[in-house]
């Protein structure tokens, strides 16, 4: 039982770490594209780790199955939504950070 509690705490701590890093990236990065990159990657991994910890904590097989389905949904929906938002920002004329060297859609920015 102590090992299961330690794994639960570790998964929750990893999730909290990645969620915190995502918030720091959101506050510190200069443009919408880098902010979205930081939050998408960190939130996906952070939420998955927290849900794994919650599944371990519950101990119920049905609850674990529901947590795994939510994790799969997050792994599919979060990057897809971020890509759609980034493309909409690009098409609306949002310029990348001036330190960006290459625009994948528009060519060289130097």
Image (spheres, rainbow, N blue to C red):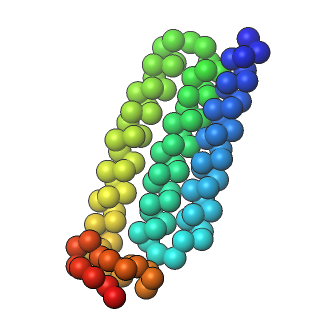
> For residue 60, which quarter of the picture?
top right
Residue 29 in the image: state x and y as whole percent: 54, 71
Establish if 96 lies above or below 78: below
Name the residue furthest bottom.
Answer: 110
Q: Is residue 9 left or right of residue 43?
A: right
Establish if 78 lies above or below 91: above
Residue 30 in the image: state x and y as whole percent: 52, 76
Residue 62 in the image: state x and y as whole percent: 48, 14
Name the residue furthest right.
Answer: 2
Q: Is residue 88 left or right of residue 100?
A: left
Q: Is residue 90 left or right of residue 22?
A: left
Residue 18 in the image: state x and y as whole percent: 60, 48
Establish if 71 lies above or below 109: above
Towards the viewer: 92 or 98 = 98
Image label count? 0
Identity of the residue drawn at 38% across and 36% down: 73
Identity of the residue drawn at 56% across and 35% down: 49
Q: Quadrant of the N terminus?
A: top right
Identity of the residue drawn at 51% across and 12% down: 61
Q: Quadrant of the C terminus?
A: bottom left
Establish if 33 lies above or below 69: below
């Amino acid at each position: 039982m102590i090992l299961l509690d330690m794994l639960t705490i570790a998964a929750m701590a990893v999730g909290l770490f990645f969620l915190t890093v995502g918030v720091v990236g959101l506050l510190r990065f200069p443009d919408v594209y880098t902010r979205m990159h930081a939050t998408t990657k960190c939130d996906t991994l952070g939420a998955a780790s927290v849900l794994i910890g919650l599944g371990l904590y519950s101990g119920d097989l049905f609850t674990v199955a529901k947590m795994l389905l939510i994790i799969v949904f997050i792994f599919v929906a979060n990057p897809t939504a971020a890509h759609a938002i980034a493309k909409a920002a690009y098409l609306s004329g949002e310029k990348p950070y001036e330190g960006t060297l290459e625009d994948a859609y528009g060519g060289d920015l130097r």
